[in-house]
Image (cartoon, helix red, strand yellow):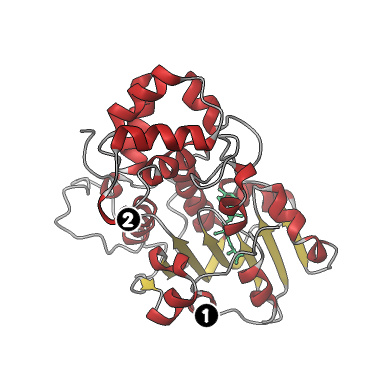
Amino acid sequence: MTALHVPVLLDEVMAALSLMPGDLYVDATLGAGGYFRRAREFGLGHAYGFDRDPDAIALNADLAGLDDVTLIQRPFAEMADALAEMGVSAVDAIVADIGVSSMQIDDPARGFSFQGDGPIDMRMSQSGMSAGDFLNSATEAEIADVLYNLGDETGSRRIARAIVADRPLHRTSELARLIRSVLGPQPGGKDPSTRSFQALRIHVNDELGQLDAGLLAAERLLKPGGRLAVVSFHSAEDRRVKAFLRDRSGSAPASSRHQPLAAPARSPSFQRPAKAVRACVAEIARNPRSRSATLRAAVRTSAPAWSSAVSQAAAKKGHRA
Ligand SMILES: C[S@@+](CC[C@H](N)C(=O)[O-])C[C@H]1O[C@@H](n2cnc3c(N)ncnc32)[C@H](O)[C@@H]1O
């Protein structure tokens, strides 16, 4: 039995959500229910908990029968549609704590980790294409692009070549061994397969696409004065959240080369976001996972949702090496 996920920045997230009795609350990433259970202490009107992982829904089964709780096993990109199907079109607070839970990463059978041994799976939803399916069927160039773009892996081409030469690969231990043999020891003793495993996980779960769609869904769902809090653990995710909130609050730099010159003026759909919040030294000592967490929060205005795709130009990083 793996240890339960310890929620990160719990007090800071609750402060950002400013929950009030009677509020309609959405947790887009239920996980072990750490945020969800604390949020319910505020006397919510109704709490909706989304998770694409059936194990997370099962873990919170004790809540499922309560009148003021609805648990939904769907990706958060679909949360506006899922709530609309239940007759809910507006809510007061939405939180998303994106990425993997400790239960997922610590269970070798889920295949997320280069430590231990399990199938090369990595699917949060436990359905669809696994990381192993991808590695065993994609071209060398496709594999290299995923490792570089989503893991910042500068040895991506060499790793991809070795994977294609050695496949089919089935076990996480095989994959980790292969990456170690290609890259050799890393400065600081970090496992050489860290970046590649992260990249594969993000790819297989379309985590960046989910985040973009989830932000748009949150913009649609939040009432005027509604609060959004997003915790991310990866710079590519944080860049997207930051770019979205800067765009939507009208606080993107005026000189930004990413702003189209002739863009029509639109009313900000979010107030200027609060500064990013990171874990304090004491929390990092208690829970080392919190070291890379960033919380961004903002309050919805009464302007209509912008309805266009997320402006991701400002969130892009450098080009393929
Ligand atoms: C970091 S954990 C959340 C922990 C939670 N805040 C707590 O206090 O226990 C992330 C959870 O989000 C889920 N998840 C990640 N991406 C998702 C998505 N696009 N849609 C729904 N659930 C997602 C994962 O399955 C995982 O259970």
Q: Residues within 10 Å of mark 2 (few under 14, many from 20)?
A: many
Relative to 172, does residue 219 appear above or below in the rendering? below
Q: Nearer the viewer, residue 168 or 45?
A: 168
Q: Callout 1 environment at 10 Å: few (<14), some (14 to 19), or many (20+)?
A: few
The quarter in which the C terminus is drawn is top left
Q: Where residue 23 sits: x, y (%)?
A: 66, 74
Q: Residue at x 73, y 69 (%)?
A: 46
- Quarter assignment of residue 265: bottom left
Viewer-proximal residue among 133 and 211:
133
Q: Position of residue 302 (x, y in %)?
A: 47, 67
Ligand 1, image quadrant it occupies: bottom right
Instruction: Judge by depth and name the residue closer to the eye, 251 or 198.
Output: 198
Determine the residue positioned at 44% across, 42% down.
197
**Mark earlier in primary sequence (1, 2):** 1
- Left or right placement of residue 155 versus residue 107 in this view: left
Give the quadrant of residue 33: bottom right
- The residue beneath circle 1 is 11
Q: Mark number for residue 76?
A: none
Q: Residue flagged by tag 1: what amino acid is it?
A: Asp
Amino acid tagged 2: Ala
Q: Which residue, given by chain and number where applicable, does mark 2 sit on? A: 243
Residue at (40% x, 24% y) in the render: 163
Q: Residue at x 41, y 74 (%)?
A: 279
Q: Quadrant of the N terminus?
A: bottom right
